Structure formats: C-alpha cells, structure tokens
Amino acid sequence: MVSLETAESALKTLYLGVVSEQLNINANPLLAKIEQTSNDVWGKEVVKLAPYGVNGGVGAGDETGNLPKANGNNYAQFKLDLKNLYGTIEISDKAMLASDNSAGAFINLLNSEMEGLLKASKFNFSRMLYGDGSGLLATAASPSLGAADEEGTEILYDTVYFDSVKNLMEGMTVDFYSGGSSSTYKFTKRITAVDRAKKGVKFDVDVSMLVDFYELYIQNSKDKEITGLKKIFSDSESLYGVMRSNNFWLNPYVNSEANNTMSITLIQSAIDNIEQNVGGEIDFITCSYDVRRFYLNYLNTNRRNIDYMNLDGGFKAISYNGVPVIADRFIDDGVMYLLNSSDFKLHQLCDWRWIEGENGKIIRQNGNTPTYTATLVKYADLMCDRPAGQAMIKNIKS
C-alpha cells in the first residue's frame, strides 16, 4: 500500500544518490570538471587564503655571504557567503490515492516529479555557472501598442519583448523588478510561452503594458545566486571582497576588440598571455553556439582536421590542440572563455540533501491544501583561486 512513509523511503534511499550525481556531474560539462569540496567553509561563509605572485625568499649570493632574506608567499583573503540552492517537488493527495493500489503507478508518479525537478535544476544551475550572481535573466523592451517589427509583422499586444531569451523557459516562475539604480520588486508571474525568433514572452497574466525596461529574476533569487564566470570578467570594483584597483592580479585577460575574427592566432594569443604572465594552463574552452560554428567553419575553410573528445558526464566536445571546446546556451553571443578548471572550486557546506522537518520527515503538507512537498537543498558557492589565470575573447563576429 502506498503511503507517505513509502514516498519518504523512496526519496531518501532510491532517488537522492541518483539526483546528486545527475546535478553534480551530468548537469553541465564545466561543472563536471570543477572539484566540489567542503574545505574552506566556515559557518555560512567560504573564507580562503589565495596565494598570488611568487615566494620572495629566493636569490643568489657570495660563497660566504648572507643568505636570501626569507619572504614568504603573498596571500589575499577571499570571502563569499554560501548560496542557498533549492529544488522542490509537489505531489497531490489525489494523485497518491489514485496510485494507492499500484506500486508501479506510484513509481511513475515519483519518476515524473523527479525528472521535472532534475530538468529545471540542471537548466538553472548551468545558467548560474555563467552568470554574475545577480540572477538577472533578461530586461524587457516592450514596443508601443500597434507597433510592427522590422519585417512588418504586427507585434502581439499580450507579449513582452526582451533583450534576450536565452535564460528563459516555459514554466519558469519569475519576479519583475523596475530595474535601474533604485530597482524595486513589482510582481511575480509564470512564463507560459517563449517566442525565440522574436524574443517575445507570454505570461499567465497579460503584463505587456506594465513592464517597459523591467528586469526578470527567478522567484526570490535576486542577488542570491552562485558567483559565476561573469563576475570574474565583470568591471565590478571588488571580487570575493578584495578590491581590484589595488590588486591587478585579480583581473583576467580580456580581448574586447570590436570585430574579432576566428583564427588559431586569436585563440592562441589568449592562451599564450595566460602562460606567459600567470603560468596557468588552459584545459577547458567554452563558448556560445555561434562562436563554435565560426570555429568549425575556420577549420573546414583551412582544411584542418576536426578532432572530437569524450568528457566526464557523457559530454562530447570538439578539440583545440587537445583542449575541449564546448558550446553552452548560457554564454553571450560572440564570447569564448578559456579556463583552467583546476583554479575553480565549488565550496559546499553539504552535498544535495532533503530538508528534514520534525522527526526527520522530508515530506510535509502545504498549509491548508491537499498537496505535499519535499525540497532538495545545497549550500554552496563557486570560487576561482586565480582569476588572472582565466581568459575571455569578446565580439567574435565570424
């Protein structure tokens, strides 16, 4: 007989291990390369001493002269607050009763809920890896009523148009903020449809007249997401609590020429800069889909072999001199990142686990409704020990 106890046992013993592996290894090829550790986690913070430069206790001298003065390594203290990452499933009492006499039906019910949770979690966790921690998904740019696009097609009145829809998916529950320096929360809606060709989005309520230049964030997530790649390459005054202006070694290599053309020289120049100035070794290249097409076209045009690689987590990649090149939907058009994955750590208080209530119960009733929920949680954040050992090429046009 199916019961809450049956569901509790299944979620704890059958699903948790599988879900953890899926989210830690199979969610994203970059995440699969990054070490996940509980080191340097102190209470609710990640606090780490990051070395930079070289040891100062080296020198030459006379046969009987003084030895070099000891001058140890240089260290900076990096700090981050652990981010709270959640994923919730919901099962109705009616659905449980409907599968009461069939273990198979109950397993199908749980499988369906867990697959939906995994899909959403993989999408959002991958998105966070390439964000800056703010959680900004898109900025609205709705045209006036009755306007037409450049092809003369009438724009729908009940659709909101955005600068980008890469981070948006049907079913997402999002918060609207007014944007700007005095950004304030306005309301929360759910996405029902995404027109990727025109960058238009429909919501469960028509808000097209209310949202000019409003910003979208995942519900309750503004400024609460993990510190992704964009933060390292941003022009923010500080990184991990250390001021960039006084610490040039915090600044990664960025090629932001207006019109970069794909070539071996373009890529190798970034790699050479890292090797010469930092001593790092690039072992992972990730880029937008258009940049991967430019790279493949370059190889074909110059009659170079296209090598393929198999990566951890079941991912496949093309290769640049033995370094995997992966395209990711969450990277801005025209951008390529060149990374040393060993410089990154996902610091975590714990691995994925179910939130437990009284008596260790993980399934609880939703207030006065006939539904039950269970919530996965992970307290973690991403930190790069050596920001200057990473590189980005922008504005790749062809």
Image (tube, rainbow, N blue to C red):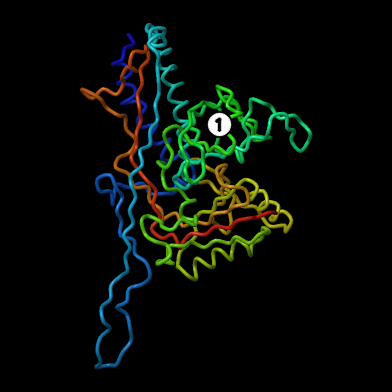
> In the rendering, at what x and y percent does residue 118 appear?
45, 30
Above-or-below relation of 195 to 299: above
Residue at x 72% of width, y 29% of height: 146
- The residue lying at 40 percent from left, 55 percent from top is 384
- 244 with respect to 155 (left or right): left
Q: Is 223 or 343 nearer to us in this picture?
A: 223
Provide residue 192's location: percent of width, then percent of height: 57, 24
As drawn, 383 above or below 15: below
| Amino acid type, label 1 | Met
Quarter of the image with the N terminus in it? top left
Residue 52: % across, % down = 37, 66
Indicate the quadrant where residue 268 lies. bottom right
Quadrant of image for the C terminus:
bottom right
> How many circles with numbers are drawn on the protein?
1
Q: Is residue 233 left or right of residue 334?
A: left
Q: Which residue is mark 1?
A: 169
